Amino acid sequence: MGLESIGISEIVNENVKVIDQEQNIFDASKVMIDNNIGSVVVIDNNESKNPIGIITERDIVRIVSAFSLSDLEVPARKLMSNPLITLSKNASVLDAMKLMYERKIRRVIILEGNMLVGIVTEHDIFKLLMGNKELITTVIASDFPIPQKDVYEDFSRLWFSNSFYK
């Protein structure tokens, strides 16, 4: 069994926190703090709930350091990261890992058509690997599509953060 045979739906977090595009960065920050999460998905409106962007902790740090505090009042649609980087709910865990590596991101939004299904983070993949040690051998194999140096660095960082920061 390899990562290409494990569906992303097995590890997807369906409890995605969202904000409307007209809400501001302060609202996004509050949702992240209240839920102890690192991102919120921005939706077009509360009726259709189509995902159109994302705001991450990194985005907020960038906004606060590069702009003025009044920018926290600016609508999310003006400061969100977009377009969203997404995968189909039919994708594999390997697809998610490759996409995260290629796009240098830590999370990917999972869709069914245009509808938000969930989110998968690098921590979700790490937990999967730690729960199934035989999968680790596929990740460190010489024919794995992500360079071993990068896999090792990510694995080491996640191991450290999961060991000491619960």
Image (tube, helix red, strand yellow):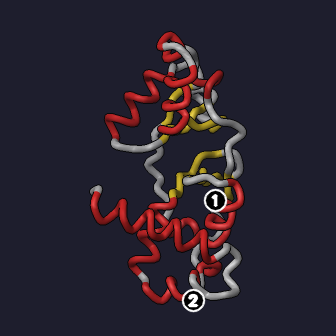
Which amino acid does the dot numbered 1 rest on? Answer: Met
- Identify the residue at image location x=69%, y=36%: 82
Residue marked by disc 2 = 1
Left or right, 62 with respect to 162, comes to right
Dot 1 falls on a residue whose secondary structure is helix
* Between discs 2 and 1, the one toward the N terminus: 2
Q: Position of residue 53 (x, y in %)?
A: 63, 36
Badge 2 crowding class, 10 Å Cα cut-off, few under 14, some 14 to 19, many 20 or more, is: few
Element class at badge 2: loop
Q: How crowded is mark 1: few (under 14 residues within 10 Å), some or many (20 or more)?
A: some
Does 146 appear above or below 80?
below
| Image mark for residue 15 | none
Depth check: 61 or 9 in front?
61
Residue shown at 45%/61% (left/top)? Answer: 123
Label placed on residue 100:
1
Q: Which amino acid does label 2 sit on?
A: Met
Task: Name the mark nearer the viewer: 2 or 1.
Answer: 1
Q: Position of residue 148 (x, y in %)?
A: 62, 77
Looking at the image, which is closer to me, 124 or 153? Answer: 153
Figure label count: 2
What quarter of the picture does the C terminus occupy? bottom left
Q: In which quarter of the image is the N terminus?
A: bottom right
Q: At which x and y percent is residue 142? A: 66, 87
Relative vertical location of residue 77 with respect to residue 163 in this rendering, above or below: above
**Residue that appears at 45% across and 40% down:** 17
